[in-house]
Image (cartoon, rainbow, N blue to C red):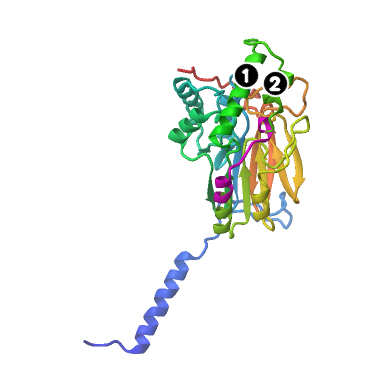
Amino acid sequence: MKYQPLSRVLLILILLTSCKYTREAPQETTRFTHELTGEVLPWTHDHFEETETDFTFAIISDLNGGERPHIFSKAVAQLNHLDPTFVLSVGDLIDGGTTDTDQLKREWDFFDQRARALHMPFFYVGGNHDLTNKTMREFWEGRFGPRFYHFRYDDVLFLMLDSEDYTEKRMEEIYQARDTAIRILDGLMEGDYATSTYRFMPERNLGGMSEEQIAYFKEVLTQNQDVRWTFLLMHKPLWLNDDGDILQREDIPLEPLETALAGRNYTVFNGHFHRLSHRERHGMEYMILGTTGGSQRPNDSTAIDHITLVRMAEKPEILHIKMDGILESDGRINPAIDPKME
């Protein structure tokens, strides 16, 4: 075998390396062009974000507790115009509250038919209307898989929590008390809702979280220490120990995760109350969202249909956009109509 002189081999390697570097070098932009030649120009600067590293996601809130027609379908059309990377939810997607699996299938088919019109992925979170009893929990797991889960997008972590995470015995007690209260309110049985068992159950507004779920998310946080931000989405506020009315509890289910999150950047979103509010806790933002079609209290200025848009740059830039302010090119709100429920 005849060997090449060392100097020739080195020259070939240098040339190959140089060629590779030239191919991978960033190219100058040609997206912005103009023909002006003066020293002063009618724009501030020409430093464009040619390769943006940020992304935007959206969140929808409660549809139910008395869904008003056509609102969610309009939100889907508006989201397709806004074009976020993906859409998240905070639960109460169907009316639910039943053990009739045929009814559950019809309601989930109706929701999914509308959600599938989104041009981007949609992520489910269950609320009390979606996970009212053991039958509904099993239906969810058969159709959507786990009730709590996580995912990453780039170096951002998303924790999707189940705030209806009780033992089967406690879930049945809540379900029976809730069913009785609804029958009283609907005039189907005698009684006073104001003194009903369900009205005084902390789980009615504050939710619950099992040790299994807490352990799962603690492990997730341990395995994802390199993320720059974490988002927590849930239906009921697992971070409250009172609802500002009559419900109180001694413990706060989210506290073990808040302890695990100490020193990290994170943001919390939940729904359930059907009115928009914001506060800081542990130096972080905690937001209760309004509605995206759910029932609203009359004359409550915080009870609004909106889409939450989050631009994930160095830190989240969060906007709550009222749906009645998103207009088509002709100046009208999108007239999207719900498909018929089969």
Residue occupied by mark 2: 196
Determine the CA span between mark 2 and mark 1.
Answer: 8 Å
Question: Which label is found at residue 102?
Answer: none
| Residue in the foreground of this view, choosing between 76 and 286 | 286
Q: Position of residue 153 (x, y in %)?
A: 54, 50
> On the rendered image, what quadrant is the C terminus found in?
top left
The three-letter amino acid code for the residue at tag 1 is: Thr
> Residue 17 appears in which quarter of the rendering?
bottom left
- The answer to whether residue 313 of the structure is visible from this angle is yes
Residue occupied by mark 1: 180
- The answer to whether residue 261 of the structure is visible from this angle is no
Question: For this view, does 107 lie left or right of residue 90?
Answer: left
The three-letter amino acid code for the residue at tag 2 is: Ser
Q: Is residue 220 above or below residue 334?
A: below
Q: Say what secondary structure mark 2 lies in.
A: loop
> On the rendered image, what quadrant is the N terminus found in?
bottom left
| Residue in the foreground of this view, choosing between 43 and 120 | 120
